[in-house]
Amino acid sequence: MTVIAIADRRRSAMIGQWVRDPTWMLVQVESPEMLRGKVHNITAEAEARIRRVGSHRERSVIMLEGGPDRDRTWSVWVRATFSNYKAAYLAFISHAYAVALTGDDVPGYEVDHLSNRAYAPTGHEFIRVEAIPKAANHSWGVNFESRRGANTDARPSHRLSYMSCAKLGGQLPPTGPKDTAGINALVAYFTSIGLDPQEARKGVADMLQHAYWRR
C-alpha cells in the first residue's frame, strides 16, 4: 500500500469521526498527558498508549496508539515549535503501517498541522499532523489562515474545525464572505459528508465571520 492510499484512508476516517462526534476530535493539546490513557479523538472508552516515533525525541514528537484500527486510533503529534514534522509523519506511517519509504512519498500532498500553530500560546503544545491535499492546504493558508491568526484567542487545546475538516476533504475556501458560489459549494460538501444543511451553513458562516469580522 502506498503512503498516498494510507493518507487518504486516514483523512476519510478522521472526517467520518468528526461528523459523528466532533467533541472528541482534539487536534491540539497542552501536553501529551492529555492524551494518555484515553483516545480523546476516538471514543471515551478507547485505551491509548504514547510511544516514541523513530529517532525523534518524545519532547518533540509522539505517536498515539489506540487500538487495531490504525486509520482511526493511531496518530502522530508534534510540539508546536518543532519544524521537521514531515519527517515525523513519514516515520510514523512507516512504523504504524510497516511500509518502506522512498523519496517524496506524498506527491500532491503537504504534511501540515491540523490546528494553526499561531493558536498555541506557549509553543510547547502538541498538534496533530496529517497529509493534506496540497492545493487545498495552500489555498486555505493564503486566503484564510493568514487572516485568522490575529483574530483568535490562543488556547492550550483545540478541536478539529470546519476549516481543517474542509482541508482534509480537499475542499477550496470561499474567497470571502461575498463569494456565494464558494460558500454554497462548501455547504454542499459538508452536507454530502453527513451534516444537516442548516448546521453546515451556520458552521461555514461562523467560520467566515471569525476570519473577516475586522474587515
Image (cartoon, grey):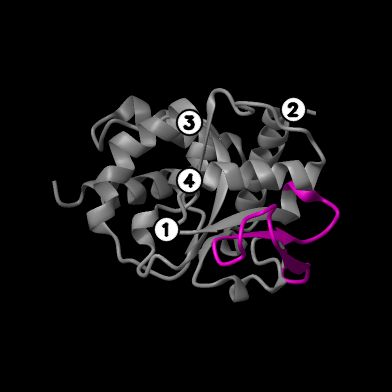
- Is disc 4 placed on a helix, strand or loop? helix
Q: Is residue 62 magenta?
A: yes
Residue depicted at x 65% and y 67%: 40
Residue under the point 29% across and 60% down? 152
Residue 187 belongs to the span the image colors magenta: no
- Dot 4 surroundings within 10 Å: few (below 14), some, or many (20 or more)? many
Between marks 1 and 4, how big is the CA–CA gap?
19 Å
Mark with earlier residue (3, 1): 1
Q: Amino acid at mark 2?
A: Thr
Q: Which residues are magenta?
A: 44-71
Q: Position of residue 179 (x, y in %)?
A: 28, 29
The amino acid sitting under disc 1 is Thr
Residue denoted by label 2? 2
- Give amino acid for label 4: Ser
- In the depicted structure, whether residue 181 falls above or below residue 8: above
Residue 5, numbered label:
none
Which is more N-terminal, label 3 or label 4? 4
**Mark 3 highlights which residue?**
171
Q: Position of residue 70 (x, y in %)?
A: 78, 49
Q: Using the numbered discs, state the Cα–Cα distance from disc 2 to disc 3 in whole angstroms.
A: 22 Å
Confirm or deny contact between disc 3 and disc 1 (CB under 8 A).
no
The image shows residue 161, relative to residue 101, as above or below, that is: below
Q: Are marks 4 and 3 in contact (CB under 8 Å)?
A: no
The nearer-to-camera label among 1 and 4 is 1
Residue on which disc 4 sits: 164
Residue under numbered circle 1: 81
- Pair 2/3: label in front: 2
